[in-house]
Image (cartoon, rainbow, N blue to C red):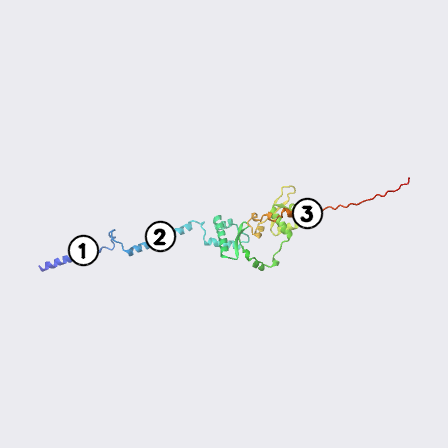
Amino acid sequence: MHEMDEMDGMDEMHDEFGDDAHDHGDTDPLDPGDPGDPVDPVDEAFAEVEVEVEVESVDVAETAARQVTLPGVPDADTVRAIEAIIMVAVEPVPAELLAQLLEMPTTVIERLCHELARSYDEAGHGFQLVKVAGGFRFQSHPDQSPYVERFLLDGQRARMSGAALETLAIVAYKQPISRAQVASIRGVDPDGVLRTLQARGYITEVARDSGPGQAILFGTTPSFLEKLGLASLADLPPIAEFVPGPEVVEALEHGLRVEPTTSTTTTTATPTDGAS
C-alpha cells in the first residue's frame, strides 16, 4: 500500500511538471514554433537591422553598377582632366576636342566647363575660365589687370600704332577685304601695315577676289579673337556706335570744304590817237 501511494505521488508530480513545461513553451530550439506565438522584440529589431543592411548593400551595388555601365557619367576625375588640359594648352581648347579626349558627349563637356567657370567666379579666384575663339582657356580676372600690368614689363610688349589699329579694325569689320579696298577707305597705301599685322598673326589671306587680277582678300585670325577675348566675330561691338552722327559729318565736310576765291580786276582801255 505504501509503495502504491508513492507511485501515485510521482505520477501527479510528472503530470504537474509536464503541464508547466507545456505552458512555458519548452520546445525544441530548432522548432520554428507556432506562427501565432508572440515574437521576441529583440529578435524583431535584429531582423529589421539585417533587412536595412541588405537594402543598403543592394543600393550601393546598383549605384556602382550604373557608374560602371554608363561611361558618359562625369565624375571628379573628368573635371580634373579638363582643368589639366586647359592649363597646359597654348590656345583655347574647343569643347569638341575635350569631348574626344575624355570620351564624353560634347554637351556634357560644355555644361561642365560653364559650371567650372561659375564656381571660379563664386569662389573669387584671380583667374577665370572663359570661352574665346571657339574654345576654353584660363585667363586673369579683369579686376586684377593693374597688378598684371605691373608684372609685365613695358619693353616686352610691342605696342601697335594708330595706323595698324585702324587697318585692323577695317579688316575686322569689312572682311574679306582686299588691299585696294583698305587703301580706298584709309586714303593711304596700307602695304606696310598689312604686312605687320600679318606677321603678328592678326590677319591672314582668306580668299582671292573673283574679279580681274584676283586680288588677295584678308581676314582676321583666331589669334585676333583670342587677344580681344571674343568668342566669335559676332561679338564685335556694333560699328554704328563708332560712326559719328549726321551733324558731325556735316560739320566735318563744311570744315574741309574749299571755298573758291574770285578776284575782280578792272581794266581801263586807254584810247590811242591814230595818225590819219
Quarter holding the N terminus? bottom left
Of the two numbered discs 1 and 3 in the rendering, the one whose residue sits closer to the viewer: 3
What is the x, y in percent for residue 250? Answer: 66, 46
Of the two numbered discs 2 and 3 in the rendering, the one whose residue sits closer to the viewer: 3
Indicate which disc, 1 or 3, sits on the residue closer to the N terminus: 1
Mark 2 vs 3: CB contact within 8 A = no
Going by the numbered disc 2, the residue's amino acid type is: Val
Q: Residues within 10 Å of mark 1 (few under 14, many from 20)?
A: few
Taking the view exactly as shown, the residue that stands out farthest to the right is: 276
* Cα distance in 3D space between marks 1 and 3: 130 Å
Return the residue at label 3: 254
Secondary structure state at the residue bearing disc 3:
helix
Return the residue at label 1: 19
Mark 1 vs 3: CB contact within 8 A = no
- Residue 55 tag number: 2
What is the x, y in percent for residue 257? Answer: 70, 47
Residue at x 53% of width, y 56% of height: 127
Indicate which disc, 2 or 3, sits on the residue closer to the N terminus: 2
Going by the numbered disc 3, the residue's amino acid type is: His
Secondary structure state at the residue bearing disc 1:
helix
Secondary structure state at the residue bearing disc 2:
helix
Indicate which disc, 1 or 2, sits on the residue closer to the N terminus: 1
Q: Residues within 10 Å of mark 3 (few under 14, many from 20)?
A: few
- Residue 168 tag number: none
* Cα distance in 3D space between marks 2 and 3: 89 Å
What is the x, y in percent for residue 275? Answer: 91, 41
Task: Examine the image and state in which quarter residue 147 appears.
Answer: bottom right
Taking the view exactly as shown, the residue that stands out farthest to the left is: 1
Quarter holding the C terminus? top right
